[in-house]
Structures are given as C-alpha cells and as structure tokens.
Amino acid sequence: MNSIKTPKDNIILVPTDFSTASDFALEHSVGIADLFDNQITLLYVVEESFFKSIFGGGMEKAMMVDTINNKLKEKAEEIKKRYPSMTVNTLVREGKVFKQIIEVSQTLACDSIVMGFNGVNGVEKFMGSTTTRVLKSSQVPVVIVKDIQSSVQYKKIILPIDLTKESRQKVDWAVQLANQYGSEIHVISEVESDEFFMNKVKASLHQVEGILSKNNVKHVTKLLDDQEYPDHFGKDIIKYSEEVDADLILIMTQKEAGVTDYLRIGSFARHIIHESRKTPVMAISPKETAKSYRATESFA
C-alpha cells in the first residue's frame, strides 16, 4: 500500500462491456484504487438503438437493465472480497456510449477514465470510434489498457516531445506523475535531418530537462536516430518503450504536430493506442483548461 493517500471521493470511471479487454481495465483500475484510496465507478452503457430494436415494451427493457445491474454488482462484490475497504459503485446508462462516458465522468467529477482496448481483432465495443471520441472529448486523462499484467506503478514513463506549446502541458503532467509514483521519465524525440529543426528539438529537450531537474524528477533523454529507429515516430515510441520495459506512454490526444505532421489524433495517438500491446497509454487532451485539471489525484 502506497503511503501517499488522496481524498476518498476521487473516482476512477471504468466503462465495461463485460469483455476481456474491459476486465483488464478494471483490474488495472483496482490496482490504482488500492494504491491511492480511490473509488471505482463501473459503467455499462446500453445503446439506445439496441433497446429500440430488441425490446417492444418497458417490462423487457427493465429486465435487461436488472440483468446488467446484477452482473455489475457481482463484479463489484468480487473486488470487495479482495479489497474490503474499496468502494466500487455500479451504474447503467442508456444512450450513445461515448456521450454517456463523458457525461458520467463530468457529472461524478471523475479524475480519470480507464478503458480496455483490444487492438488485435477489433471486435470490442470500446474500440474504434467510441475510444477516439472519448479521447477527444474527455476533460480528464484517459488510460488505455490492453494487458492484465500492466503495471500500475508507472516507474518508467515515456514522454515523447514535439515543438508545440501543448507539450509543456504534457511535461507538467509527467512531473505530477513522477512525483506521485517516483517515476523515471524517458524524454524522447526524433533526430531531424534539417539543422534548423534539429536545433529547435535540442532546445526543447534542454528546456524539458530543466523542468524535470527543477522538480527533482529522475529522467533519461533519448534522441531516436534513423539507423536504430527507422520507422515513423509512433512505431519508434513503441519500440523504445518495449526496449526499456516502460510502464506508461504519455501522449496528447488532439493535434500534436510539431516537427512532423504525423503527430495528431488521427494517426499518431491512434497508432500508439492500437499498436502498444503491452504498455498502457495515458492520453490527455491539450485544451486551455488542461492546467485546471485536478491532475488525476489518483495519478498526481
């Protein structure tokens, strides 16, 4: 049990469809909640179209909701058996899945959303457009988990750096995480063939190193050259994270186009989320309100 505690009303939202991927997310959330005395809210969203097409009357719909509620409560009870002091709430909502996830996260003032994601066969409910929409709309960090063995300690965090102002927000989050978890931050960027851009990259890395040093954060800086890392930045990040056995990759979900146009939600973030089979990904929306986040008190 970590000695650092946070208020017990901090809530981690875990959307589920009772799939293996969402079970992985739940286990990951339980590990975080155990470390920081968080509550967990387990959410199931039934699409409006599902009720309309399957059920003709209110009784059938009520029975369906009761069945889902009972299954959620069973999962909550299983967790309580292992962690008697943990609070696990359950909730069933009807509507568009991504809209309900965002609405619930805001209504309950959740400090993070943890989602399962199966990027191998592409059949999980919280894949594709739902995940992308949640990432774009969420006011709090979204952690994407694929592997039940994923560490909740976050001892090694990968911090890709570009030349945008949003990267400063990402550095602030990295500092928060490192202070809470005692993490080592791996600051990475790509070698640029253009001397002008390479100088800007070096200056940016130097500034990030200064911020981390000022906050007493352990860190390593790595420039990914084309010989050792010949692919695009997304693939190179995953390769490096696997080489150092990282526990978390920290990215921004909106446009992150600095030295390369590849850094954007449509390709970069989506590629990291799809292809990072082992390392959880924390995605943060770089909005003007980003610094007003409560920095996921379970995380920061």
Image (tube, grey):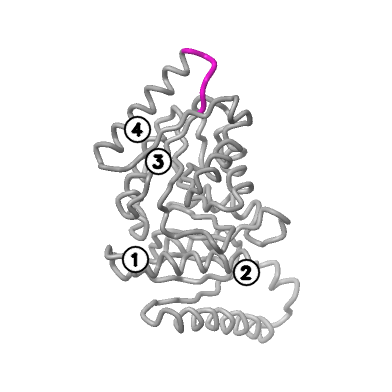
Q: Residue 217, image x and y in percent?
A: 30, 43
Amino acid type, mark 2 = Asp
Task: Determine which quarter of the picture holds residue 215.
Answer: top left
Q: From the image, state whether disc 1 or disc 2 is nearer to you.
A: 1
Which numbered circle lies on residue 36?
A: 1
- Secondary element under disc 2, as helix, strand or loop, is loop
Q: Residue 226, image x and y in percent?
A: 59, 25
Q: From the image, state whether disc 1 or disc 3 is nearer to you.
A: 1
Please identify the residue farthest to the top as the structure is shown.
Answer: 195
- Going from N to C along the chain, the mark reached first, 1 or 4, is 1
Q: Residue 106, image x and y in percent?
A: 42, 60
Tell me what residue is drawn at x 58 percent, y 60 percent: 147
For disc 4, the marked residue is 208
Number of other residues with Cα within 10 Å of mark 1, as a class: few under 14, some 14 to 19, many 20 or more: many
Amino acid type, mark 1 = Phe
For disc 3, the marked residue is 170
Residues drawn in magenta: 190-195
Tell me what residue is drawn at x 64 percent, y 67 percent: 20
- Going from N to C along the chain, the mark reached first, 1 or 3, is 1
In terms of secondary structure, what is the magenta stretch mainly?
Answer: loop
For disc 2, the marked residue is 17
- Going from N to C along the chain, the mark reached first, 4 or 2, is 2
Amino acid type, mark 3 = Lys
Query: Is residue 280 in sight in this rendering?
Result: yes
The span from disc 4 to disc 3 (Cα, nearest Å) is 10 Å
Q: Is residue 37 above or below residue 190?
A: below
Which numbered circle lies on residue 286?
A: none
Question: In this rendering, would 11 be left or right of 194?
Answer: left
The span from disc 1 to disc 2 (Cα, nearest Å) is 25 Å
Mark 3 touches mark 2? (CB < 8 Å): no
